[in-house]
């Protein structure tokens, strides 16, 4: 499993409640661009419309600028390939919950997306996460010096 794009800030900004794996419908040059590890998940989210899950605001720049169609939109809506049961669970998120992509990776020569149901953290939760991370880092340094 080779990770192509990772949204590392998601673990800091959100409390992850549930994760799902989904395929993604891409164009050929988008696949090449992703395999070159170009792209971003910042600000991307998932919407369910008409019984289908769509990822929105995900940036995939063109692989070769001059060989791309003139009407190509790097932040276009891309369809996610999920089961009907998974789509039903994702669409029934309650108030204060949202669905965001966490990572894009290759599994068995297919490009997959990890999608998570998340709740936004408050400022004090973020501070607590930072303190815990710094404490763990100091403990590992102290153990390493022994």
Image: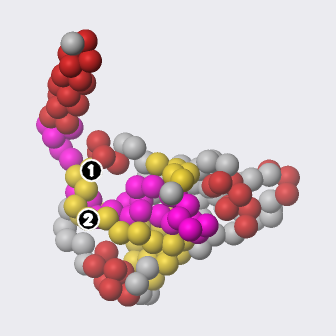
Residue 4: x %, y % from top left = 55, 51
* Of 95 and 103, the residue lying toward us: 103
Residue topped by disc 1: 14
Q: In this view of the protein, can residue 127 be seen by the observer?
A: no
Residue at position x 53%, y 65% in the image: 107
Residue 46: x %, y % from top left = 41, 67
Image quarter of residue 77: bottom right
Q: Where, quadrant-wise, is the C terminus in this rendering?
A: top left
- For the stretch drawn in magenta, what is the main secondary structure? strand
Residue 85: x %, y % from top left = 32, 86
Q: Nearer the viewer, mark 1 or mark 2?
A: 2
> Judging from the image, what secondary structure is the residue with disc 1 in?
strand
Q: Is residue 69 left or right of residue 79?
A: right
For the magenta stretch, what is the residue range? 99-126
Outermost right residue: 66
Q: How many marks?
A: 2
* Of 34 and 55, the residue lying toward us: 34
């Amino acid at each position: 499993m080779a990770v192509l794009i990772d949204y590392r800030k998601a673990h800091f900004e959100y409390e992850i409640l549930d994760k799902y794996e989904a395929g993604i419908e891409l164009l050929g040059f988008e696949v090449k661009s992703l395999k070159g590890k170009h792209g971003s998940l910042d600000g991307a989210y998932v919407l369910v419309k008409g019984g289908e899950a769509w990822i929105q605001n995900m940036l995939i720049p063109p692989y070769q600028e001059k060989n791309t169609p003139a009407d190509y939109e790097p932040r276009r809506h891309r369809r996610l390939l999920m089961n009907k049961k998974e789509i039903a669970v994702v669409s029934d998120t309650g108030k204060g919950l949202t669905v965001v992509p966490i990572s894009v990776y290759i599994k068995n020569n297919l490009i997959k997306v990890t999608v998570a149901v998340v709740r936004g953290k408050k400022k004090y939760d973020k501070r607590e996460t930072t303190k815990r991370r710094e404490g763990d880092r100091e403990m590992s340094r102290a153990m390493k010096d022994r």
